[in-house]
Every structure is written in C-alpha cells, then in structure tokens.
Image: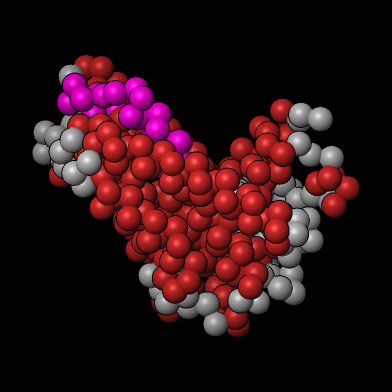
C-alpha cells in the first residue's frame, strides 16, 4: 500500500524501522529510505542554482534542466547506495557502527538481500546514466567530461577518497563547480567563473554537514581505519574548520555583492546571523557524552552534523531566495 506520509518522512529525516515496518512499505518509500533521500535536497538546490544562473543569462531550457536535476539526484542516490555497500563489504558498518545508529542500513539490518540491493542500484544508476547520456547527445562539449567526473566521484568517493582524507574536499568540488557550474554549462553552453564563485557559497554548506558528521564519528572512524579529514586533523581543529567554513559563506556573499557580481538581495542570508552564537557554543567545545534533555528524538548520536545540517537548510533557503530576487531584479 502506498504510504505518502512515509515518503514525506523519508525526505525529511532518516527513519529507523523494524523489519515488520519495512516489509509494509511500498517500493518508493523503500527506495527513498535506502538511498537516504533526506539529503537529496542539497543536490536539487545545486541544480536549481545552476538553472537560475542560466535564466539570468537568458539560456534556460526546461527540458535540459529537468534532465539535469533528475540525473544529478539519481547519481547522488546511487552514490549513497554504493557508500553503504562498500562500507558494509569492508566491515566498516558492522557491530552497531555509527552509520547504523541514526538511520536504516538495509544490508546491515537484514532488510534487503544483496540481489535486491543491486537491483535498486541498477535501476537508480541506470536512470542517472540514461539522463546523462541524453544530455551529452543534446549539448556535447564539456558535458561528457562533466559526466565522467561525476561518475568518478560516485564510484570512488567511499573508497579510496573518504578513507584517505579526500572525501571532504571532494564534496566541496562536487556540490560547487561540478554540480552548480556543470548545470549552468549544460544549459548555457559555456563556463562561467561568476557561477563558480557563487557555487562555493552553496557547496560550503554540504561540506560543513559532512565535516560535522565525520567529526561526530571521529573515534569510530579512527578505530576502523577510516582516515577522514577530521580523523587526520583531530576534533578541535575539525570543529574550528566547520566554523571557518560557515563564516566563509557569509563573507563570500558580502564579497560577491561588493564586487558587483550580484546585487543586495544576496545579503538576505544575513538574517541567519543570530544563529551564529548557538553554533559558536556548539562547535566551541567537545561533543557532549549524551544528548541534552531537549534534544530531538532520533537524531543522536549526530551532534555537530545535526547543527550544521539545520544551519545549512536555513542558510541555503535564504541564499536561494536572494539569488531568485536578484535574478528577478536584473
């Protein structure tokens, strides 16, 4: 039976389910949960931002944009599925590892056989490849190179990049120049460095979320031999890095306005400034040993990543609003 309520829940968070609850779900709900669909909004926003910039350049095409946004989201979903598979096969996600505590892991929780899992991967990756191939046929030029670069990160983000401190820089590159800049290129047929700089403002958001998550599970990763950047830097430096990236988002917006690349509407992001003292308090000290009494149920053991995620959603919404208003006024 179709459960639209569960679709909405899966798009908003990573629900934990029993085997009985899982078996009662419809295929769409299972897919949304298996591929961690709650984080796909970041990919949608990247494509939306690239589309807005193409609109500003009078180069927007609905068919190309829809194919781009869907292709990117299915590619991201493929990456999430492969991430879980790789970590499961390498033994990282066993013994109630961090990943298993805050969401469903369909393989480790025994909710799906390996054959069923690979059918999910095949369909998801197949849709991404089909849309990407159509875009290459339509646009040519750098489109093939952009698709190959995306495929590289889909296949090799989990291993070896994440295991050797390259996962975080990869996210900054993927959600910035590759997704936003690439979306613009597919629509406009040319590369824009203004779009590239703007893309970094957005890409710093997903990077803070990943940095926060890897800081949350720093000790667990270290014990498993997963040398993420926070493992290499240590907790204190990692916390400071997140604060620096959050600050950079605001400073880059101000710089883009002062440089004349964008208008004053971009400064609407400053509405989020009142939350900075809270973030300073959270990232200014080590993670607590247990969640505070008023902490939302089902979020722990995520701490730094949960706060970074909330800020990213708020900041990104305002940032996108600023770009939309500025585009209308141009």
Left or right side of 164 for 4: right
**Residue pictured at 32% horizontal, 55% vertical:** 148
Residue at position x 35%, y 63% in the image: 169
Q: Is residue 302 left or right of residue 60?
A: right
Foreground residue among 163 and 297 = 163
**Which image quarter: residue 113?**
bottom right
At a point 84% along the width and 51% down the height, the residue shown is 18
Query: Which quadrant of the view contains residue 316?
Result: top left
Q: Main secondary structure of the magenta part?
A: helix
Which quadrant: the C terminus? Answer: top left
Q: Where residue 267 sits: x, y (%)?
A: 28, 32
Residue toward you, 290 or 188: 188
Q: Residue furthest front?
A: 137
Residue 243 occupies quadrant: bottom left
Quadrant containing the N terminus is top right
- Percent position of residue 38, x then y: 58, 43
Name above or below for residue 61 compared with residue 308: above
Can residue 90 be seen here? The reply is: yes
Q: Can residue 44 be spotted in the picture?
A: no
Magenta span of residues: 52-73
Query: x, y (%) of residue 223?
Result: 60, 82
In this rendering, position of residue 38 left or right of residue 14? left
Q: Was residue 242 drawn as part of the magenta stretch in this picture?
A: no
Q: Name the spot of residue 96 as percent of width and height, x first.
A: 74, 70
Compared with residue 45, is residue 144 higher up or lower down, i.e. above or below?
below
Q: Is residue 41 above or below residue 234?
A: above
Between residues 7 and 124, which one lies in front from this camera angle? 124
Q: Magenta includes 60?
A: yes
Colouring convention used in this rendered image of the protein: secondary structure
């Amino acid at each position: 039976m179709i459960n639209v309520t569960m679709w909405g829940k899966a798009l908003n968070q990573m629900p934990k389910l029993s085997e009985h609850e899982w078996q009662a779900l419809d295929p769409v709900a299972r897919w949304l949960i298996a591929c961690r669909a709650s984080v796909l909004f970041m990919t949608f926003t990247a494509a939306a931002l690239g589309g807005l910039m193409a609109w500003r350049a009078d180069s927007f095409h609905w068919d190309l944009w829809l194919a781009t946004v869907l292709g990117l989201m299915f590619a991201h979903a493929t990456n999430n599925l492969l991430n879980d598979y790789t970590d499961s096969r390498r033994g990282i996600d066993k013994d109630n590892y961090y990943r298993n505590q805050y969401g469903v892991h369909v393989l480790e929780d025994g909710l799906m056989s390996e054959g069923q899992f690979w059918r999910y991967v095949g369909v998801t990756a197949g849709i991404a490849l089909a849309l990407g191939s159509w875009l290459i046929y339509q646009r040519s030029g750098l489109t093939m190179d952009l698709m190959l670069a995306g495929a590289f990160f889909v296949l090799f983000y989990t291993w070896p990049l994440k295991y050797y401190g390259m996962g975080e820089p990869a996210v900054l590159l993927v959600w910035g120049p590759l997704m936003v800049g690439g979306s613009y290129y597919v629509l406009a047929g040319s590369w824009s460095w203004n779009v590239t700089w703007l893309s970094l403002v957005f890409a710093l958001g997903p990077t803070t979320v990943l940095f926060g998550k890897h800081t949350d599970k720093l000790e667990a990763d270290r014990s498993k031999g997963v040398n993420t950047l926070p493992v290499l830097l240590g907790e204190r430096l990692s916390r400071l890095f997140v604060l620096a990236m959050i600050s950079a988002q605001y400073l880059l917006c101000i710089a883009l306005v002062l440089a004349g690349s964008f208008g004053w509407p971009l400064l609407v992001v400053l509405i989020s400034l009142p939350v900075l003292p809270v973030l300073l308090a959270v990232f200014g000290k080590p993670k607590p040993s247990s969640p505070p009494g008023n902490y939302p149920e089902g979020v722990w053991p995520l701490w730094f990543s949960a706060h970074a995620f909330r800020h990213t959603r708020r900041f990104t919404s305002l940032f996108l609003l600023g770009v939309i208003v500025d585009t209308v006024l141009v």
